[in-house]
Image (cartoon, helix red, strand yellow):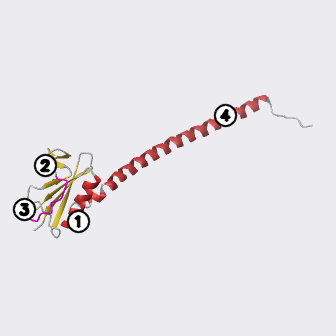
């Protein structure tokens, strides 16, 4: 027969030490979980920022680049067809004021905005005698404008000589 030589005081001390170790391990676990949550939150916000930048990248590529008039006509038609929140302004050699497609672009105090009111065209003119005719072989230089939320809202194309 086996006898236990541990006193009750020793058993209580071992039990208390076990409880302290368990509490320390739980605290470390909760701290690690909170740090992980903040890292995931930070990563999510960075992913959202990259996603919003990528969303406008197909529009941002026109900033400072030159495209042919035929590509511009196709772009205008697709933008109108998809009902995108985007204004396209085309300035031809005959019309330096420009023609607004899809939305009307305006600038006040350095901030750009677009609206559906005003002189807006939903079709591209086919008449070669029109001041707004887009020559398919002409070169157009693009300039991109963004709203205060950094979303691309307007692209202005100037016909080059």
The disc, 4 or 3, on the residue closer to the chain's N-terminal end is 4
Residue at the top extreme, as displayed:
8
Q: Which of marks 1 and 4 is in front?
A: 1
The residue singled out by tag 4 in the image is 19
Q: Residue 71 carries which label?
A: 1
Residue at the bottom extreme, as displayed:
137
Q: Which of marks 4 and 2 is in front?
A: 2
For image coordinates 53% across by 40% down, the residue present is 31
For image coordinates 72% across by 35% down, the residue present is 14
Q: Could you tell me which quadrant the C terminus lies in?
A: bottom left
Q: 107 left or right of 86?
A: left
The disc, 2 or 3, on the residue closer to the chain's N-terminal end is 3
- Mark 2 nearby-residue class (10 Å; few <14, some 14–19, many ≥20): few
Q: Which of marks 4 and 3 is in front?
A: 3
State yes or no: residue 126 in magenta: yes
Q: What stretch is highlighted in magenta?
A: 121-130
Q: Could you tell me which quadrant the N terminus lies in?
A: top right
Separation of marks 2 and 3 at Cα, in angstroms: 18 Å
The answer to whether mark 4 and mark 3 are in CB contact below 8 A is: no
């Amino acid at each position: 027969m086996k006898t236990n030589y541990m006193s009750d005081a020793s058993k209580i001390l071992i039990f208390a030490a076990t409880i302290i170790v368990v509490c320390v391990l739980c605290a470390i676990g909760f701290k690690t979980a909170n740090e992980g949550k903040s890292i995931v939150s930070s990563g999510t916000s960075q992913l959202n920022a990259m996603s919003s930048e990528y969303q406008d990248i197909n529009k941002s590529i026109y900033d400072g680049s030159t495209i042919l008039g035929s590509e511009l006509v196709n772009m205008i038609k697709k933008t109108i067809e998809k009902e995108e929140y985007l204004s396209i302004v085309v300035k031809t050699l005959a019309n330096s004021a420009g023609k607004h497609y899809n939305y009307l672009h305006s600038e006040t105090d350095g901030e750009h905005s677009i609206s559906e009111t005003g002189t807006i065209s939903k079709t591209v003119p086919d008449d070669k005698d029109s001041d707004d005719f887009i020559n398919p072989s002409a070169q157009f230089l693009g300039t991109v404008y963004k709203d205060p939320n950094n979303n691309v809202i307007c692209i202005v194309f100037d016909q080059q000589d």
